[in-house]
Amino acid sequence: MTAEAVVATAPREIEFRTVAVPEPGSDDVVVRLTHSWISNGTEGSFVRGERIAGDAPWRAGDPLPFPHVPGYQKVGVVERVGTNVDHVAPGDSVFVSVSKVDGMFFDFAGHVSPTVAHRSQVWKLPAGLDPLAASGLVLLQVGWNVGMRPPVSDGDAAVVVGDGLVGHWAAQTLRARGARVMLLGRRAERLERFRQRPEDATLNVREADVAYAVRAWAPEGIGILAHTSGATGFIESLFPCLKRFGQVVSAGFVGKEGSIDVQRMRDQELSLHAVSGWTGRRMDESLRWLSDGRLETLPLITNRFPATRAADAFDLILNNREPHLGVVLDWETQA
């Protein structure tokens, strides 16, 4: 069967075109998309040709991963199900992670409709939850995972580095668990979207002595340092702000420059959590947190494009044409 898809044809080149997808089998679900959410960091690096698979950076001698259908998160309405599928039915509103495609560098896909996905990649959305709010669920789960990894005592000081989507959801999760949170970033318009309490803070790293500002905010030291973007050298520069036995969580893609000085961590007996990917259990929990209001997504959406204009959406992300954060493709809206 055929479908419409967003295709990365070469580094920084995006087309909206027809692709081949496998005929659905007994374990598959066919979904007509309504929205798909672009992962600015992950998809941007794949489209630039910086990754060859998952968190593995492209290296000289590797094939360039083109053409491929980027993405891994979308929502829509079930059209049909295989005989072995019993958790969703036609007409259900669902979230879908990766789905299937033929004739591409990878045999899995993101932005494609209708989408054919294995039943394990499909989640029925709770009644009353806006499907648009759930369209970034995989990335939401990454931020949730960052915020859930370290132990938290009520009132602990936590610093989250990175004002992207993962940083925001990590900060929201830590806040919901009882930490007071400082969110660090480089873009004022993104930092403004963090809903602060009086005990929380944001900091533009371009405008301040970061270590001094962190110590002033938490003179007793911080218990948690969560890295969602930026170089590891910047993270290490904040180690002196951590308490002894502090927790470091790293989820930022650092490519070939991924070294952290373990001996320096040993001096303070710091613990390191290196998080990545998603699991079914974590997706279930993240969806529960979203549904009951502990996590927010809609306030982070800044741009929406018809799927047919996906090239414009990726141009915005790759070239930073204007301030943006959450970028969503609408599949029911024409150009």
Image (cartoon, helix red, strand yellow):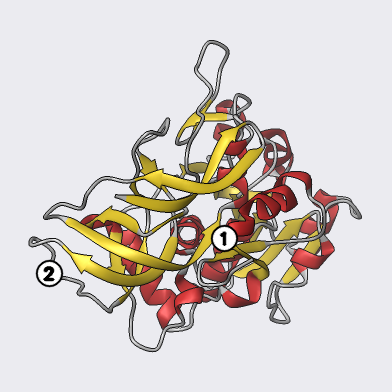
Where is residue 101, by image quadrant? top left
Which residue appears farthest toward the left when viewing the image? Answer: 83
Query: Looking at the picture, how far across and down is residue 24, in whole percent?
Result: 20, 53
Which comes sooner in the sequence, label 1 or label 2?
2
Assign a secondary structure to mark 1. helix
* Image height of 284 relative to 296, above or below: above
* Image height of 183 relative to 212, above or below: below
Side (left or right) of 223 relative to 144 = right
| Circle 2 residue | 86
- Residue 307, label in figure: 1
Badge 2 amino acid: Asp
| Of labels 1 and 2, the one closer to you | 1
Q: Residue at x 69, y 36 (%)?
A: 231
Side (left or right) of 76 relative to 184 = left
How many other residues sit within 10 Å of disc 2, few (<14), some (14-19) or many (≥20)?
A: few
Assign a secondary structure to mark 2. loop
Which residue appears farthest toward the right when viewing the image? Answer: 207
